[in-house]
Amino acid sequence: MALPVPAPDRTALITGASSGIGAELARQLASRGHGVTLVARREDRLRSLAEDLSSRHNVRAEVLAVDLTDLDARTSLPDRLESLGLEAAVLVNNAGFSTSGPVAKSDPAKEVAMIRTDVEAVAHLCSLFLPAMVRHDAGGILNVASTAAFQPLPGQSGYGACKAFVLSYTHGLRGELHGTKVAATVLCPGPVQTEFATTAGFTAADEAMMPGFMWVPAADVARQAIDGLASNRAVVIPGTANKMAAMSGYLTPRSVLVPMLARRHPSLHQHEPG
Ligand SMILES: NC(=O)c1ccc[n+]([C@@H]2O[C@H](COP(=O)([O-])OP(=O)(O)OC[C@H]3O[C@@H](n4cnc5c(N)ncnc54)[C@H](OP(=O)(O)O)[C@@H]3O)[C@@H](O)[C@H]2O)c1
C-alpha cells in the first residue's frame, strides 16, 4: 500500500508542526512531494516552516493556527481545509506534551489539557478526517505515541496512559481498515532531542540519565515514521535499544516493573520530602 499520490487538492495535515518531530515529519512529507498543512498554536513558526518547505520542495504549504485543546477549533478544521480547496489525504496526529511529577502534586488544569491534546484531539481528528479517506479508499493516518505506551510510567502517569490510548486506538483502527487502502501507523519514539523535555519540566541532568544510545535524531524518527506509514506498518519504534525497551516494558510483570520505574523517575525524586 502506498500513500495517496500527491495532488494540488490533497494535503497532509500535521499537528504539532511548529517544533521537533512534527516539523521533521512535515519536512519528510514535503520532500516526498506532498502538500502540507501545518497545525499548532505558534503561527509565526508554522509560517516560516511553510515558506521554507514550499520554496525548497515546490509544494503547497498552508498554516492553520489552532489550539488543539479547543473542541470548536478542532471541529472547524475540515471546513477550513475545504475553504482552501484541500482535502486531507494524510493525517498526522503528532501534537502532544507531558506533565511530570506525582499526580498528588499535579495541576488539574494541565492534566486535563494534556489529555485533550494527547488523546481527545487524536480521536477527534481521526473521526473528522477518516470518513473521506475511507470513501476514496485512499489515505494514511500516522498517530504519534511513545515507548511510554508499552508500560505504566509513574512520574508521568497521565502521559503514559495517554500514549497507551494512542497505541491501542491505532491498532483498533487498523483492524477496521483491513481490506481498504487507508494506512494507519503508530509511531512510538524513545527519547528525541526536541522541546518536549523542557515543556515536561525535565532538566539537562534529568535528560542525561537516559543513555546516549537511546536517543534518535528527530529527522531519523520522521524518516522511519513516513517509510512505515507508506508501507502500512503497524508500529514504528525508531532505534534498536528503544525496540528492546518497549518489548521488555510490555512483557515485564507490573509488580516488578512499576516500583523499579518509580524509584528511577527523576520527577519523583525531586518531590521526595527532605
Ligand atoms: N521528544 C521525545 O522524547 C518524545 C518521545 C516520545 C514521544 N514523543 C511525542 O512526539 C510528539 C511530538 O513531540 P516533540 O518531541 O516534537 O515535542 P515538541 O518539540 O515540544 O513539540 C510539540 C508540538 O506539539 C504542539 N502542541 C502542544 N500543545 C498543543 C496544543 N494545545 N495545540 C496545538 N499544538 C500543540 C506544539 O506546538 P505549539 O506549542 O506551537 O502549539 C509543538 O509543535 C508528541 O506527541 C510527544 O508526546 C516525543
Image (spheres, helix red, strand yellow):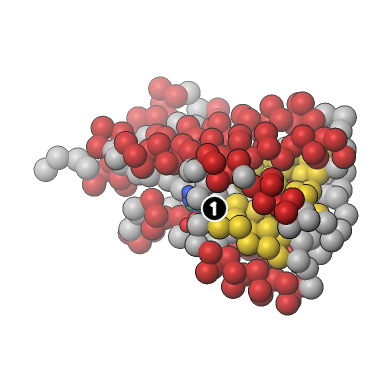
Name the outermost residue toward the front: 83
> Residue drawn at (61%, 36%), measured in percent from left and top?
124
Name the outermost residue toward the bottom: 55
Quarter assignment of residue 182: top right
> Residue drawn at (32%, 47%), measured in percent from left and top?
266
Name the outermost residue toward the left: 274
Q: Is residue 80 shown left or right of residue 69?
A: right
Q: Is residue 132 above or below residue 199?
A: above
Q: Is residue 243 above or below residue 47?
A: above
**Picture mark count:** 1
Q: Is residue 188 shown left or right of residue 30?
A: left
Quarter assignment of residue 64: bottom right
* Mark 1 beta carbon near ligand 1 (under 8 Å): yes
Residue 237 visible, this orientation: no
Residue 5 visible, this orientation: yes
Q: Is residue 118 shown left or right of residue 185?
A: left
> Residue drawn at (73%, 57%), measured in percent from left and top?
84
Q: Is residue 199 shown left or right of residue 223?
A: left
Q: Give percent across and percent down for residue 225.
A: 69, 51
Q: Give percent across and percent down for residue 95.
A: 55, 49
Q: Give percent across and percent down for residue 109.
A: 34, 39
> Residue drawn at (82%, 29%), measured in percent from left and top?
178
Quarter containing the C terminus: top left
Q: Amino acid at mark 1?
A: Val
Q: Is residue 250 above or below residue 78?
A: above
Quarter containing the N terminus: top right
Residue corresponding to mark 1? 66
- For numbered disc 1, what is the local secondary structure? loop
Say few, some or many: other residues with alpha carbon within 10 Å of mark 1 (under 14 / 14 to 19 / 20 or more): many
Q: Give percent across and percent down for residue 52.
A: 66, 75
Quarter assignment of residue 267: top left
